[in-house]
Image (spheres, helix red, strand yellow):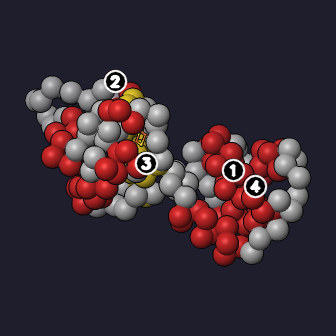
Amino acid sequence: MNGPGALESILARHPAGRRDALVPLLGEAQAGRGWLTAEDVERIAEHVGVPGEVAWSAVRSTGGLRLEPPGRRPIRVCVGTACQVHGSNTTLAALESALGVAAGRTTPDGAFSLDAVACFGACGFAPVAEVCGSLRFGLVSASVPELLAELRPARAGEPDRRPREAAE
Ligand code: FES
């Protein structure tokens, strides 16, 4: 989605006044650009007929919705049931601590973004995360330092071990 015109074309496909369309519409509006603006949230609230604070609450409580652009190296941690059972909340907390940002935020330098999302459909490999667009299986908290070392830009004289999509 790139601008108000794109949002209006999405809204035109959904009848106004359907409160149950709030979260699906927020997700659809985010899909194109990768994040939501305040104007998107307020316009969608108006369209489905809920107060703005209800829409803001939905943004805060729905995994994967974000209010700022994703980082160059997006990390999305599954917090679905199977992954939680296998410790994904601990993995997420370790990433929040190491990156210094909460889930749903992007680091100030734009290098990383962190999101908590629900189920990648790979529950048998829990805990699962998506790193720079690729699924990582069994990503436990103890693996976080190694993951970030892999993703961070190499210092001078060191080989660049980042996946190609993470390299700048
Ligand atoms: S619950 Fe995490 S992949 Fe399904």
Q: Position of residue 51 (x, y in %)?
A: 75, 75
CA gap, disc 1 and disc 3: 18 Å
Circle 2 or circle 1, nearest the eye: 1
Residue shown at 32%/33% (left/top)? 125
Helix, strand or loop at mark 1: helix
- Going by the numbered disc 2, the residue's amino acid type is Arg
Mark 4: secondary structure: helix
Among the two numbered marks 2 and 1 on one chain, the one whose residue lies closer to the N terminus = 1
Residue at (63% x, 42% y) in the render:
31
**Badge number at residue 164:** 2
Judge depth for marks 2 and 3 and give the one in front. 3
Total numbered labels: 4
Q: Which mark is residue 21?
A: 4
Q: Residue at x 67, y 72 (%)?
A: 54
Q: Camera-side residue: 151 or 118? A: 118
Left or right: 116 in relation to 142: right
Query: On screen, 167 above or below 49?
Result: above
Cα distance, mark 4 to mark 2? 38 Å
Quarter of the render that holds ligand 1 = top left
Quadrant assignment, res 74? top left
Decide which of tag 1 and tag 3 comes sooner along the chain: 1
Residue 42 occupies which quadrant of the picture? Answer: bottom right
Q: Which residue is mark 3?
A: 80
Q: Which residue is mark 1?
A: 24
- The furthest residue to the left: 157
Which of the two labelled residues, at mark 4 and mark 2, occupies the earlier sequence position?
A: 4
